[in-house]
């Protein structure tokens, strides 16, 4: 009997290996950071070889440090920082340049050209995405345009492209497998999310030869085994998804209308929108959640730039609190916000407002305003932004929201969770396990090898820490003033 599934969680700043047992308990975590390179303003790179080496090291460490035998491991699943682009030589396995990280903005100008040339609608209809430097397509083009001889070599079939999961599987199998899962493929701006295949028209538009691309496969399936001289034991690799999708899966949002939010530095809201992509809203990204067998789930995605970072700002810039958790104690000193509304548009506004010229403000200050009012309005602002994104998802998909599943550093704040439940008028559910990204990767891998039988088997082992039910229905003023405040922060700085 196998006892464990291992998730490889390949993040933006560190790689981790996390061991889960059948009851979804964590039995070991190893983690290692890797170097970030900022060669120019707006550019962010990783060394793909270092990504592979640190990922392999933590995988080996997690066995050694926790006394785990290879025979105990049923499968390995991978979740990854999305969109980060690696191109390597198929014969040597060596990258031809540093990886271009998702945050990198070097292709922004080319994206503007694509928009001006009127490609926006077509790209949204095919890929579910808005044209942006964030996605892999223009990053691939940049490498082919700028690394000497790269395009010719790509056309001759000598090179391979992959996002990080593809690169890791290539290395784990010593070049046997060149695959990506459909959720990661849906982040390239090259993948038709309806037809589930690479799109020739978009490949032509970005001058990318098709033979550079990996095969797009399911998110849960036995793809192959780890090569024996890397790690003996014939351990199956059987799950792959992008990090946000993995978190949606790890929150067990298996059905249409189920939604999760991660309250980290920013907030990442994702809703399962069912078996068809939802392309009616221009305010949201539509993406593939996962494909398991013949079943595919799509998701709507909204990124909010400032979430927990607003609490950090109160702590570090205003000095209103010494630690992040103290914001809750402070906010509880008052019954309400006393008319104060904080709009944290520090870097413009993300989904669903999309205004890069908006800036943050605090409205409604009077002689009676106390730090506690600002603390309270801070928590409200985080929850209100999440509500705006979820409202846009509900409107676009016609889905009825069942409840909100939460994770991330600020989700431990009970007052914030209560405000969120009141605003959404639905339950907010905080699970016991907050490592939802790694869990999602483990679950997808475990399902493929029958470690967990089915969704019911998983659901019976997944436990809630706390459910917040709506209590205060008197939120109309809050919503009205928020809307007013949002309008007044938009288009603030001169273009
Ligand atoms: P990331 O993964 O983006 O680094 P985390 O999930 O670790 O973020 O969450 C850290 C964020 O959560 C910080 O911005 C911090 O201000 C916020 N945070 C942590 N604890 C609390 C709390 N009790 N109340 C409100 N915010 C908190």
Image: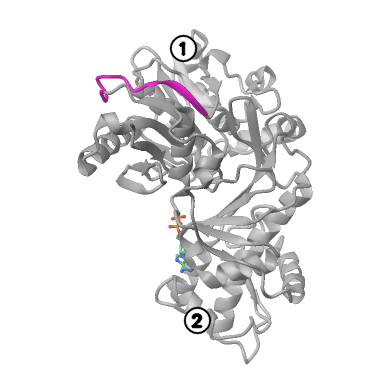
Between 330 and 434, the one lying in front of the other is 434
Which residue matches tag 2? Answer: 330
- Separation of residues labelled 2 and 1 (CA atoms): 61 Å
Q: Quadrant of the N terminus?
A: top left
The disc placed on residue 153 is 1
Height in image: 210 above or below 28? above
The magenta segment: 220-232
Query: Which residue of the protein is positioned furthest toward the top in this rendering?
Result: 156
Q: Could you say which quadrant of the image residue 195 lies in? A: top right
Please identify, in this view, whether the residue under mark 2 or under mark 1 is nearer the observer: 2
- At x 76%, y 76%, the residue is 477
- Give the tally of numbered discs: 2
Q: Residues within 10 Å of mark 2 (few under 14, many from 20)?
A: some
Height in image: 380 above or below 50? below
SS label for mark 1: helix
Q: Is residue 172 left or right of residue 461?
A: left
- At x 55%, y 41%, the residue is 456
Evaluate whether residue 85 shows in this view: no
Q: Is mark 1 within 8 Å of ligand 1?
A: no
SS label for mark 2: helix
Residue 289, given in percent of the width and then of the height, sits at 60, 37
């Amino acid at each position: 009997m196998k006892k464990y599934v291992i998730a490889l969680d390949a993040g933006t700043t560190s790689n981790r290996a996390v061991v889960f047992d059948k009851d979804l308990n964590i039995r070991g975590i190893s983690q290692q950071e890797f170097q970030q390179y900022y060669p120019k303003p707006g550019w962010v790179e990783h060394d793909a070889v270092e990504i592979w080496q640190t990922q392999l090291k933590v995988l080996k460490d997690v066995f050694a440090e926790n006394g785990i035998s290879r025979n105990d491991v049923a499968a390995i699943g991978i979740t990854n920082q999305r969109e980060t682009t690696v191109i390597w030589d198929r014969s040597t396995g060596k990258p031809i340049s540093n990886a271009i990280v998702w945050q990198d903005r070097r292709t922004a100008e080319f994206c503007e050209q694509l928009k001006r040339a009127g490609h926006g609608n077509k790209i949204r209809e095919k890929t579910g995405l808005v044209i942006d430097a964030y996605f892999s397509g223009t990053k691939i083009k940049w490498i082919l345009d700028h690394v000497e001889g790269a395009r010719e070599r790509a056309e001759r079939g000598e090179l391979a492209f992959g996002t990080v999961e593809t690169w890791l599987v290539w290395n784990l199998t010593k070049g046997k497998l060149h695959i990506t899962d459909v959720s990661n493929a849906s982040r390239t701006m090259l993948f038709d999310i309806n037809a589930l295949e690479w799109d020739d028209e978009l490949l032509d538009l970005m001058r990318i030869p098709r033979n550079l691309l990996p095969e797009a496969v399911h998110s849960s399936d036995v793809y192959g085994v780890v090569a024996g001289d890397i790690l003996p034991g014939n351990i199956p690799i059987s799950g792959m998804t992008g990090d946000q999708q993995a978190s949606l899966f790890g929150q067990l949002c298996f059905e249409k209308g189920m939604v999760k939010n991660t309250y980290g530095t920013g907030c990442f809201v994702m809703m399962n929108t069912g078996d068809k992509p939802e392309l009616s809203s221009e305010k949201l990204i539509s993406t593939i959640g996962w494909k398991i067998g013949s079943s595919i789930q799509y998701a709507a995605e909204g990124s909010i730039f400032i979430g927990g970072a607003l609490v950090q700002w109160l702590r570090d810039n205003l000095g209103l609190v010494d630690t992040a958790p103290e914001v809750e104690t402070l906010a509880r000193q008052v019954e309400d916000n006393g008319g104060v509304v904080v709009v944290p548009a520090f870097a413009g506004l993300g989904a669903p407002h999309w205004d890069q010229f908006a800036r943050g403000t605090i409205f409604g200050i009077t002689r009676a305003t106390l730090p506690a009012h600002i603390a309270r309005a801070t928590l409200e602002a985080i929850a209100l932004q999440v509500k705006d994104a979820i409202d846009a998802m509900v409107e676009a998909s016609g889905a009825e929201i069942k409840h909100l599943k939460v994770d991330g550093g600020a989700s431990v704040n009970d007052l914030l969770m209560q405000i969120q439940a009141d605003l959404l008028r639905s339950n907010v559910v905080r699970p016991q396990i907050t490592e939802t990204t790694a869990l999602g990767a483990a679950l997808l891998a475990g399902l493929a090898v029958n470690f967990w039988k089915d969704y019911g088997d998983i659901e019976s082992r997944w436990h809630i820490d706390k459910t917040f039910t709506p209590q205060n229905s008197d939120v109309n003023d809050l919503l009205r003033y928020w809307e007013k405040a949002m309008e007044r922060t938009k288009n603030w700085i001169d273009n």
